Amino acid sequence: TGYELELGTALMTHPYHKTDNPVNLLYGGANTIHVKGGFFALVQLSPRFGLEAGVGFRHNSSCRLIVPNAGINSVSCSFGARYKIGNGAVRPGIHRPAGDPLNKRFRFSVFAAGGIHRCMAEFNADLLLPPEQRQDSYTPWFKGSVGVDAVWRYSRVTSSGLQAEIHYLGNIDALKRSDEALYGPGERSYSPVAPGLAVIQDLYFGSFTAGVGVGAYMFKKVGIHEDHGMLYQKVWLKYYPPSFYGFFAGICLRAHKFNQADYLEFSIGKII
């Protein structure tokens, strides 16, 4: 038994269009991203062959790379068979040199991340207009963060810890205009900065780590439409190049309420 994380992409053949396909509010573009987390059980029938069953939660959307972006959330069940090819076994977490910073029991790392977010508030405000007057595309706003991780690697394959970050929201002007269009004039609070604190968990596979985080913003003011509460979630994959000890690059999906993608962020960082 064990748990698994998936991060992949898929093709949507008939996405939203303001006149040709206005009813598809699930996907605004052809490219979609899916993320899954779940548990599995494996029955080994022989040294090479086994049967597997699993259950997990799956989210599929455009990750706010384009709007509309309602996406689909589902509980998925899987059944399959495994067959081992070759004689060597890949054992996670043991392929780094002994002196590599990644092997430290307790360590800190710093990172910077950023990505593109398109604002659903702008799209929903546009729906108040006739179809022919709506925009063909929407502004790609920058969002990003800088932060520090403090983790304890208590086994060869896993570690737990805390992540503190300062999150920057580049779409505040769009939120102000959209809130006024959707809800009328009024006094509302907005801030482009939202500090957060999260509990994080990593799995190690040689030069790669896959991880999840659940956190809360200590301070967040985004008006009405984009206020999804103070909690946020993250799922990521990081790569530690063997030639550059201590450095890493990663890709991460940030979400709210476990079912609403915020944006896809790309990160670089270093163990200190």
Image (spheres, grey):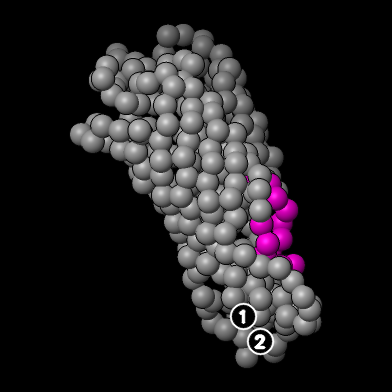
Given the image, on which type of amino acid does mark 1 rest?
Lys
Q: Is residue 175 magenta?
A: no
The residue at 57%/84% (across/down) is 135
User: In the image, which residues are magenta?
Assistant: 220-233
Q: Between 244 and 219, which is closer to the camera in this rendering?
A: 219
Given the image, on which type of amino acid does mark 2 rest?
Pro
Q: Earlier in the sequence, mark 2 or mark 1?
A: 1
Residue to which mark 2 is pinned: 131
Q: Is residue 221 magenta?
A: yes
Q: Between 42 and 101, which is closer to the camera in this rendering?
A: 101
Q: Which mark is residue 95?
A: none
256 vs 122: above or below: above
Q: Secondary structure at mark 1?
A: loop
Q: Is residue 69 visible?
A: yes
Q: Residue furthest top?
A: 46
Q: Which mark is residue 18?
A: 1
Residue contact between numbered discs 2 and 1, judged by CB atoms under 8 Å: yes
Q: Between 213 and 187, which is closer to the camera in this rendering?
A: 187
Image quarter of the N terminus? top right
Q: Residues within 10 Å of mark 2 (few under 14, many from 20)?
A: some
Q: Is residue 42 left or right of residue 266?
A: right
The residue at 23%/36% (across/down) is 244
Image coordinates of residue 179 in percent, x first then y, are 72, 75
- Magenta-drawn stretch, dominant element (helix, strand or loop): loop
Image coordinates of residue 124 in percent, x first then y, are 69, 75
Q: How many marks?
A: 2
Q: Is residue 34 left or right of residue 225?
A: left
Q: Residues within 10 Å of mark 1 (few under 14, many from 20)?
A: some
